[in-house]
Amino acid sequence: MVTFLSGGTGTPKLLDGAGAVFSPEETTIVANTGDDIEIGGLFVSPDVDTLLFQGGGVLDRETWWGIAGDTHRTNSALMELADAAGLPEGPQYLPEDAQTAGRDIANWRRFSGIAEFMTIGDRDRAVHITRTSLLDQGHTLSEATQRLADAFDLSVDLLPMSDDPVASLVHTDEGMMHFQEYWVGRRGEPDVENVEFRGSSTAEPAPGVLEALEDTVVIGPSNPVTSIGPMLALPGVADSLAQTTVVAVSPFLGDEAFSGPAEDLMEAVNAEPSTEGLATAYPFADAYIVDEGDDVEFDRPTIQTDIKIDSPEDAKRVTRAIEQAIEIVS
């Protein structure tokens, strides 16, 4: 049995080859929900959705988000309507008193749908409408995720990290903003000063998460701060990881991030913005998988391979290195 901690695009790319080593029926994926937002009244869970679409065979592999071949008529119409009405573009938070009104799980991350700043496809939107409706009917995020996983015929177990609201908020030189505003709306341009996982101290891991962490855990090459950090901030998660076998795959090619804003975010939390910083980010790891050209040294087993993943074959190569590391430390 193996459990993957997943966020962003790095771990999903790795999962393309995981089936060559780990049986899907014995694989659990815990997905980051700190990136979730409510936009235009719809609850969007980007990291969960990437895994749903990947498992369902419909993921857009050019972008690693959304559904391949999707249309964007509603998104385009929203932009045109806003322009015609003289309404502003870009990320627009709902008023402060609305941030904790309505469905609790959306706390601190509510955006207006005017001139929708995220490009949401039409089939993609159907998923958000269904999820939001299930939440409004009283289902938990875990229950809604399970229904959607059934719809996409997933062969692995997919768990959101929590059924409670946790928001990844980035403090910048231009003020505090949700990670989606910082990365999607502002293209990662503001200088990061700190990162906050609001709500994490009172949130609980979703049902099944702590049990899944009793199995061997693989932390994929996702952003250690905003993809994996929200999970580690949940009560009991770090303690559980300290008690089990953990293999961490570097999201860095030396001192260059695999993808996304990992370097700036690592610096903001006082971690070395390179593979070396994994010792700070994941002190509980029993082994590390790093790139073959990386000369980093850890005080625990380290497997070197080409960690760049551009194809399922690449993913299989990295997964076999993970298997080797597990055999060494188990």
Image (cartoon, grey):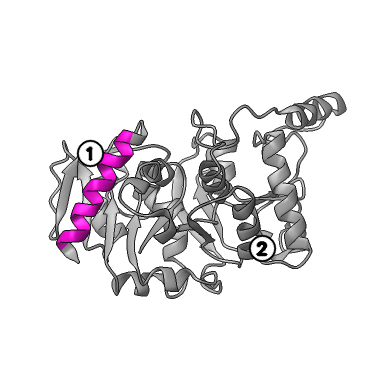
Q: Is residue 185 above or below residue 194?
A: above
Q: Give the range drawn in magenta.
A: 313-328
Can you identify the residue that label 2 sits on? 105
Q: Is residue 186 above or below residue 38?
A: above
The quarter of the displayed image where residue 139 is located: bottom right
Q: Is residue 322 magenta?
A: yes
Q: Badge 1, how many Cα within 10 Å: few under 14, some, many 20+?
A: some
Q: In terms of depth relative to the viewer, which is nearer, 127 or 112?
A: 127
Residue at position x 32%, y 55% from top? 270
Which residue occupies 76% across, 27% down? 73
- What amino acid is labelled 1 in the image? Gly
Label 2's element? helix
In terms of image quadrants, where is residue 295? top left
Marks 2 and 1, the one that precedes in the sequence: 2
Is-magenta flag for residue 299? no
Q: Where is residue 214 in the image (x, y as percent from the top left)?
A: 36, 72
Label total for image: 2
Q: Residue at x 24, y 58 (%)?
A: 279
Neighbour class for label 2 at 10 Å: few (<14), some, many (≥20)?
A: many
From where the camera sits, is residue 235 visible? yes
Q: Is 34 on the left or on the right of 81, as rendered?
A: left
What's the amino acid at mark 2?
Answer: Ile
Q: Disc 1 designates what residue? A: 254
Q: How far apart are marks 2 and 1 (CA)?
A: 37 Å
Q: Where on the picture, by quarter, is residue 96?
A: bottom right
- Image location (x, y in percent) of residue 1: 35, 64
